[in-house]
Image (cartoon, rainbow, N blue to C red):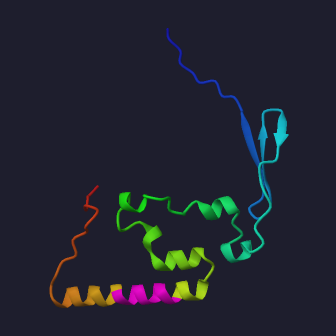
Amino acid sequence: MLEFGVTLQLLFVVGGGLLNQIALYVKKCSKNVSTPLPEDSELYYGFTKFAMSLNEMENGQAELLPPSDTRFRPDQRLLEQGDITAAEDVKAALEARQRERRRQNEMEGRLHIPRWFRYSHG
């Protein structure tokens, strides 16, 4: 008779709160791996410097990404820069253009064919 199993060993525990410091506890010792929030973090949803940097584009990366990547959206960029009012205005204008394009296509009987995805039934 063969028996298969997995031995689980706790290596790390993450503690803390959403808006305060987060600590990483390694085995039986603890080490605080967080840093203080940036001064203007309230403009960026209370994100840490690390969290704010996750959506930044590296040099040469733009050529490798599809045009649909959210990092190319001007409203997203403005939001990340903390300009919420301008981001809302740009997004509203973008959505208005999308609705107008959809209405025009429906009136002309044109079917939308996705450029980057395929429909699947399942």
Give the percent coordinates (x, y) of residue 117: 28, 62
- Looking at the rendered image, the quarter that the C terminus falls into is bottom left
Query: In percent of the image, x 83 and y 32: which residue is there?
Result: 28
Query: In percent of the image, x 69 and y 66: which residue is there?
Result: 47
Q: Is residue 61 above or below residue 10?
A: below
Q: Is residue 42 above or below residue 20?
A: below
Q: How many marks?
A: 0
Report the magenta residues as a range: 89-97
Query: In percent of the image, x 36 and y 61: which residue is there?
Result: 63
Query: In percent of the image, x 84 and y 40: which residue is there?
Result: 30
Is residue 39 toward the left or the right of residue 119 in the image?
A: right
Q: Is residue 122 magenta?
A: no
Which is more toward the observer, 6 or 54? 54
Is residue 76 toward the left or the right of residue 9 in the image?
A: left
| Residue placed furthest toward the right | 29
Is residue 19 toward the left or the right of residue 120 in the image?
A: right
Q: Is residue 91 magenta?
A: yes
Give the percent coordinates (x, y) of residue 119: 25, 62
| Residue placed furthest toward the top | 1
| Residue placed furthest toward the front | 59
Give the percent coordinates (x, y) of residue 11: 72, 33
Which is more toward the observer, 3 or 66? 66
Give the percent coordinates (x, y) of residue 75: 49, 80
Q: Is residue 34 above or below residue 77?
A: above
Q: Residue 61 lies in what quarter of the image?
A: bottom left
Q: Main structural element of the magenta stretch: helix, strand or loop? A: helix
